[in-house]
Amino acid sequence: MVLGVDAGGTFTDFVCVEFKQPIAIKIHKALSTPAAPEQAILEGIRAMGLESVMKNGDLGIIHGSTVATNAVLEAKGAKTVFVTNYGFADMLQLARQTRPQLYQLEFEAVAPPVAPELCLQTGGRLAADGSVLEPLSASELRQLIAEIKAIDPDAVAINLLFSFIDDSFEKAICEAIADAGLRAFVSRSSQVLPEYKEYERGIATWLNASLGPIVGRYLRALQQQLGKSTLQIIQSSGETIDASQAEDFAVNLLLSGPAGGLIAVEYLAAQLGLEKIISFDMGGTSTDVALVDGEISTTNEGSIAQYPIAVSMVDMHSIGAGGGSIAVIDSGGMLQVGPRSAGADPGPACYGKGGTEATVTDANLVLGRLVPELALAGGLRLNLRLALTAIQKLADKTELTAVQVAEGIVSVANEHMAKAIRLISVNRGHDPREFILSSFGGAGGLHVCALAEAMSMRRAIVPVHGGVFSALGMVVANRGRQFSKTLGLETGRCDDAELGFEFDTLEQIGRQQLALEGLSADSLTARRTVDIRYIGQSYALNVAWTNRQEAMAAFQQLHRRRYGYIHRGATELVTLRVSVVFENPGFVLPAVSVESSCNKLDPLMVYDDAVKRKIVTTSSLRPGEEVVGPAVISEYSSTTFVASGWSAQRDRLGNILLEKTRP
């Protein structure tokens, strides 16, 4: 029995799959407990009746966690010392000298990630070709250890120049720290990110060090509560890692939760025979958008807060627009929505938990797109009176009615999300009209029609169990690791055999690490890719590797699609990448059952006009039965609003298929 758990900022989602015949799927949704995320997880396990299974060790738990993400966003990482070469103590503070926004000439400076007094310098400097410029003497090591002891940090991040070529100096520092009996968590750049660009490598190493102790404490506490049951964590790249190993690679967990949703999209697309999907995951706190064109794309150019994240992660874009996003009237009289969120506590005003500020959820309730008569996840019932009161406060500051303000809140939120979709599609050479919009998350179905129209898309899909879809993705995720090595070779001088040896070495490291989780080498598969760029460029494009000729052809094609041209200049192969995975066999989604109908008519207010809407519970909708908008399709974990000019029907698997019916 496998349980996927996605702990978000507002809700914690559960999907339990029992691998019997027929497959049995059970879902649950509960309010998160941000101060102690494990509480919501344990309460959910009890509510699903799985406590005895857990205690017997018969439950395999795959967890998407926001612990690492929240620690970065809230600047609550462990006290960390940053060790680098002489003259580079201010490396993280200087960063890349780029403005947050290109045309914003004046901006508020941000504090350096590591305070100057925690940045230490030592010898052991290499040149760009790997030759030694400054050796690391025994006296320098003793001095460094004494300085670290005096500071007494929780963690140490070691980032020496060009250590991806030769890691012996970094290893020597690690050994000296261990020999001195220091209990600090140690992270070295040659292990975390053995690639060029010392600033990005330094940020990754610092994040890994500062997050390691926090992630470790959380996972150990959770594992202790879970008893003999196994615990895996989903990584930003979409594969899972055993909880016992995750602490050492904490920086790889920054997109732990959102990655599950994208895995679920790929899984569903395979079952439906679809290739081109734009995914749109709208939860209570944020929205994540991504593009799947045959397969999930990963990137090494992600970011969180103001920091670049150069470790492998699914290629998605996140914005602070969710169901709990708070709406305000700014000093200029303009309506603003997000990024501040009401979260799970107190939550939107309509939750009745003390929240008084208007949110996107309150606006949808006022517009009749949520049904107060029907209980939602965890027995939650929405209070229309409280939602109206919160939105009326904003209306009183304008010349608009509460309904018009609610419509404005939804419109502003929709535009934020449409802008994000354009960023990952149009801006990268993709035509959204060739794709299907897949909308999930607890709030996604409420906005799917409006977003599809904004992108000129005529078809959309709200997946079965859409409100807990990311948790479903965790159940079907592969186990695996990502490895890389910077070479920096002119492509014309590359030898396929020599590169094959380098790939083999990385692959062997991956197989050894996964063997620690009990996986045999024969059960693993490896995927090889390379980063290529034109000489003189600062950034590269990643393409599949079989040989040099095919990789170059793929690079030229991708460069033309992304940037509109092919350059005649020479190219260089920058970094080798290997993904080693154990492929999850997965399962086929079972056909849905149909309950007795509970459809009814009710007035829906839109711009002060009373429109009759049809309210349908998903379980009462027969496969193939058409629902013409405006209508509301409600289920336990989410609600879908079918706008005017759209129709919806349920397929045999329970997915809601939406299609635009008017020009």
Image: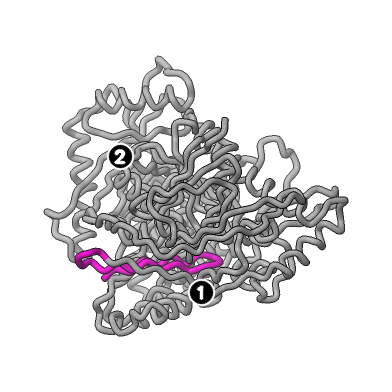
As for residue 272 lying within the magenta part, the answer is: no
User: Is 4 within the magenta?
Assistant: yes
Q: Please report the bounds of the magenta region as a residue range.
A: 1-23
Residue located 58% across and 49% down the image: 447
Residue 530, percent across and down?
A: 31, 36
Q: Secondary structure at mark 2?
A: strand
First-in-chain label (1 vs 2): 1
Amino acid at dot 2: Leu
Query: Is residue 308 visible to us here?
Result: no
Which quadrant does the N terminus fall into? bottom left
- In x, y percent, where is residue 277? 42, 40
The amino acid marked with disc number 1 is: Gly
According to the picture, the residue beneath numbered tag 1 turns out to be 378
SS at mark 1 in the image? helix
On screen, residue 406 above or below 438 = below
Q: In the image, is 531 to the left or to the right of 616?
A: left
Would you name the residue on which mark 2 appears? Answer: 576
